Amino acid sequence: MKNLRNKNIIVTGASGGIGNSIVKKLYENEANLLATGTRIEKLEELKSKFNNLKILKFDISNNEKIEEFIENATKQLGGNLDCLVNNAGVTKDNLAIRMNLDEWKKVIDLNLTSTFLLSKFAIKKMLKNKSGKIINITSVVGHTGNLGQTNYTASKAGIIAMSKSLAIEYAKKNINVNCISPGFIKTAMTDKIDEKFKEIIVSKIPSARLGEPEDIANAVLFLASNQSNYINGETLHVNGGMYMA
C-alpha cells in the first residue's frame, strides 16, 4: 500500500533502536536507502540484514562537512534525493542551574543546528527534482517540557518551529516538511529508566504501555509515501495518548 520503490531516502541515527526500525520498515517497502550513524559496526550489522542497503559513517555534529555528506550520500543513491529522515539526536540531561554551557550547546548544536543544515542541503537537492520530503523526529517533551532537559526540550521544540517555516518556504516547490513526535518508546534509553519511574510514566499514558520502535517507523513510512502528499508543516504525535495537541 505504501510502496516506496525507486524512492531515494537517507536515514540519520540509523544505528539506534528507532533508527533500526525505520530502516527495516522503509527497506521492506522497497526504498533505495542510505543509513548513516557514528557506529560503523552497527551500520555493517544493518547491512548484513539488508543486502541492498547503503551505509555511510558520519557524525552529524561535524557541521562543516554536512554539505559534503549530503553530496556523497546522494551520489551513492544514484544522484537524486527524494526523502531525508532526520532521526539522530543526543541528550545531556541536567537541572538548569547545574547545566554547563557545553551540555547546552552540544544538544542544541546536534539536535537543532545539524538538523537544519541537513535539511538545508537536502532541500537544495530536492529543488532540482521539483519534489521531496523531509521527516524530522522530535519528542513529546518538546511540547510538554521535562525535568532536567531544558537543552533537549528546547532543541526538539525548535525543530518543530523550524519545520513549519521550511514547509512554508518550499511548499510551492512540492517539498513537504513534517515532524513525528514520539512519546516514550521502548529503546536502550528507556531500558535504563528506573522501574518505579517507568511505572509512573506508564500511568500517565492512556494506552497504558510504552510504544514500540515500529510505531515510529510506521509513521515515517506514511509521511514518506505518496499518501501524505497534502500534509505539510504538521507534527504527527505517536505517544499512546500521553499528549494530545
Image: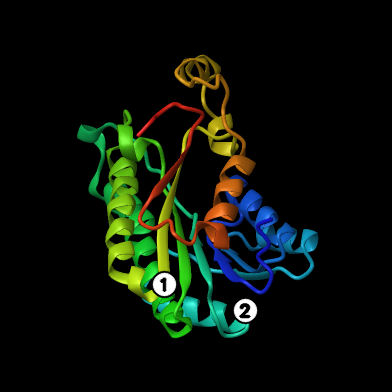
Task: Left or right? Give the position of 234 relative to 132.
Answer: left
Quarter that holds the C terminus: top left
Q: Residue 102: x, y in percent?
A: 28, 51
Rate crowding at label 2 as few (under 14), some (14 to 19) or many (20 or more) other CA atoms within 10 Å: many
Q: Earlier in the sequence, mark 1 or mark 2?
A: 2
Please name the residue that numbered disc 2 is placed on.
77
Please name the residue that numbered disc 1 is placed on.
174
In the rendered view, tell whether residue 207 sits above or below residue 122.
above
Q: Identify the amino acid type marked 1.
A: Asn
Q: Residue 242: x, y in percent?
A: 44, 26
Q: Secondary structure at mark 2?
A: helix
- Do callouts 1 and 2 mark residues in contact (Cβ within 8 Å)? no
Q: Nearer the viewer, residue 218 or 70?
A: 218
Task: Left or right? Give the position of 116 relative to 55.
Answer: left
* Residue under the image location 39 percent in, 80 percent down: 124
Residue 38 can be seen in this image: no
Q: Residue furthest left?
A: 97
Q: Nearer the viewer, residue 27 or 232?
A: 232
In the rendered view, tell whether residue 4 sits above or below residue 102.
below
Q: Nearer the viewer, residue 68 or 101?
A: 68
In the rendered view, tell whether residue 200 sits above or below residue 125.
above
Q: Residue 69: x, y in percent?
A: 49, 76
In the rendered view, tell whether residue 125 sits above or below residue 95.
below
Q: Secondary structure at mark 1?
A: loop
Quarter that holds the N terminus: bottom right
